[in-house]
Image (spheres, grey):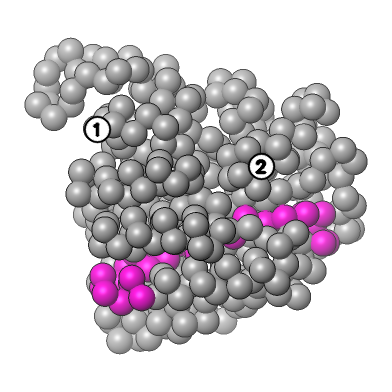
Amino acid sequence: MTERILPAAGYRRIATEEAFITPELHQMYRDQIASGGIDDPGFISLMGYYLTSTSERATTVSERLQDLGARRLADMDAAGIDMQILSLTSPGVQVLKADIAVAMVRSANDQLAEAITRNPARFAGLVAIAPQNPAEAAKEIARGATRLGLKGVIINSHTQGEYLDNPKFWPIFEAAEASGLPVYLHPNTPPPKMIAPFLESGLDGAIYGFAVETGLHTLRLITQGVFDRFPKLTLVLGHLGEALPFWLSRLDYMHRGTVNSKRYDFMKPLQKKVSDYLRENVYYTTAGMGWEPAITFTQSVIGMHRVMYAMDYPYQYVPEEVSAQDALPISDADKKKFFQTTAEQVFRL
């Protein structure tokens, strides 16, 4: 690491996509990988690396994920981060059997709430759920909002190959909308039906597979009418929207053409353009994308008030990126929105 990053003048730095894992889930991942209990090649490839490799990157990330105390706070201080919004690392409990997942996620949310209680000025958090059981997931969202004081919902994209555009999952969106909690749709490795060409080229994780899979999930939600059914639902995407802002014009043109062609019986007209939902129902964070041209482009096409800072700790702990984003060519007022006030608004901090 380079020199310590000093506190910012005029705003707090709130990092909005910062991961953790509980000791119990960490051990369960290890056990499942060792026993072959999870038949998901993406999970085995990605988490198998972080849990079994002796490389410096794997061991450091694994250690930092489990720390909700002194080490994490020291890293935040060194990088000039005032607050982290914590979320259970991908894939959360979404690779587990439903009954185990429901119990495990309640424990994880309880431990997260305890960590926040110990450091309320430094931590906030998102409630994790087990989409495998939509009814229990809806209950956990309500519990997270009312009893635990959590500020959003974390969903690690697909759940064992299933996507949330299926109406059986819509009680989750109903609960999130009713609770006023945003849903952070975090990437997962592509599901078994999709992952083969990514694995054989080493592109299954954050380098590319994450963005393709989560961008697909987001478009499924939009084109299948989730935001028409739940117009007040707020979605948050990391990594500057998984490249979707770059596609706005083409998405509108091709969606309109596909609907008009009646090529797919299930592709129905929407109340708005695809780009309207991406501008009106979605917020974007810079997690893992601390690159000025991409940030300023997204701000220009989506809106300055919809792009928030994130670090992607501990997977991408690069304090120098904080200084680079401090230097973005935007006004002081917009910089405060970017680092602080948009996050405060979205997550009701």
Residue 170's mark?
A: none
Residue at 48% in and 79% down? 26
What percent of the width, then of the height, locates residue 55?
59, 77
- Of helix, strand and loop, which one carries label 2? helix
State the residue in front, 202 or 328: 328
Q: Is residue 124 visible?
A: yes
* Residue 120, magenta (yes or no): no
Q: Is residue 60 visible?
A: no
Please indicate whether residue 214 sits to the left or right of residue 294 in the image.
left
Residue at 26% in and 58% down? 135
State the residue in front, 10 or 51: 10
Query: To which residue does mark 2 refer?
Result: 344
Q: Residue placed farthest to the left in the image? A: 265
Residue numbers of the magenta segment: 77-103
Please indicate whether residue 181 sits to the left or right of residue 136 in the image.
right
Q: CA distance from mark 1 to mark 2?
A: 30 Å
Quadrant in the rendering for residue 249 = top left
Query: To which residue does mark 1 refer?
Result: 224
